[in-house]
Amino acid sequence: MRLLVDLAGVGPGDQVVDVGCGPGLFLKAAAERGATAVGVDPSVRMRRLAMRRIPAGLRPAVTVVDGAAEHLPLPDGSATVAWAVASFHHWSDPDAGLAEVRRVLAPGGRLLIAERLAGQRGWFRGHALTWEAAEGLAAKVGRAGFAEVAVARHQAGRRQLVVVAGRHPAGAA
C-alpha cells in the first residue's frame, strides 16, 4: 500500500480518485497522507465495506460513490491523482475508462494503474497483467492523451506488481 501511495506522490492538498476502490484500503492510505479521496465502485457491498473500514477521524476526507471507470460521477478536472489498484482488469471498456480518468484529472494530474504481474500461465492470470500486456496498456495510456507514460515492476511483499503511470498534460483540458 505504502509503495503505491509513494509512487503517486500523494500528500496534503491532493484530491485522489480511487477507481474500483473495493474495500477502501487505498482510500484510507490517501487520507492518512492528508489528501481527500473519492472511491468509485459499482458494488454496493464494496462501497459499504470501504466506508466501514475508514476510521472515524478520516471519514471527513473520504467519500465513496457508485460508478465505474467508464462513467466516473465526478466533475471535470476535479482530481490531482487517479489510481486503479487491482481493478483495471475489471474495466469493461479500457479506452472509455482512460478517457474518463483523463477528464476528471486536472492538468498535471497523476495516473497510476497497478496490477499483479502475471506469468505466462497461472490461475490468477485474468486478475493480473503480463509484462507484455502492461506494455500494451502503457501504449494505450499514451494514445489516451497522457504524457510521461512509464511502465515498471515493483516488489510489494511477496508479490510483484506492474505499474503503468502517466500524467495529464499540463495546460491541456
Image (tube, rainbow, N blue to C red):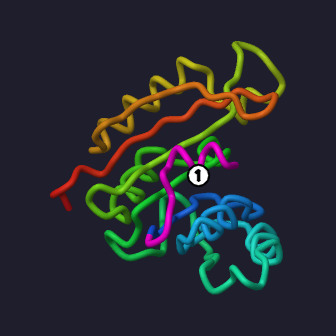
Q: Is residue 5 magenta?
A: yes
- Percent coordinates x, y for residue 23 in the rendering: 77, 63
**Identity of the residue drawn at 41% across and 45% down:** 95
47 or 152: which is nearer to us? Answer: 152
Which quarter of the image is occupied by the C terminus? bottom left
How many residues crowd mark 1 within 10 Å: few (<14), some (14–19), many (20+)? Answer: some
Residue 32 colored magenta? no
User: From the viewer's perspective, is residue 69 above or below residue 28?
Assistant: above
Q: Residue at x 57, y 19 (%)?
A: 131
> Measured from the top left, where is residue 82 in percent x and y?
48, 57
* Element marked by disc 1: helix
x then y, percent, for residue 27? 65, 65
Residue position for label 1: 5
Q: Which residues are magenta?
A: 1-13
In the image, residue 100 sits, relative to residue 50, either above or below, namely: above
Q: Is residue 53 left or right of residue 126?
A: right
Instruction: Please give the name of the residue rendered at 30% of the width and 51% of the height, measured from the top-left corner.
Output: 168
125 shown above or below 40: above
Q: Residue furthest left?
A: 171
Residue kind at label 1, given as amino acid type = Val
Q: What is the total number of numbered labels drawn onto the structure image?
A: 1
Q: Position of residue 155 (x, y in %)?
A: 69, 28
Which residue is at the far top? 120
Against 57, residue 144 (above or below) is above
Q: Front-most of 54 and 173?
A: 54
Which residue is depicted at the point 44% across and 72% down?
13
Is 142 placed left or right of 30 in the picture?
left
Picture quadrant of residue 29: bottom right
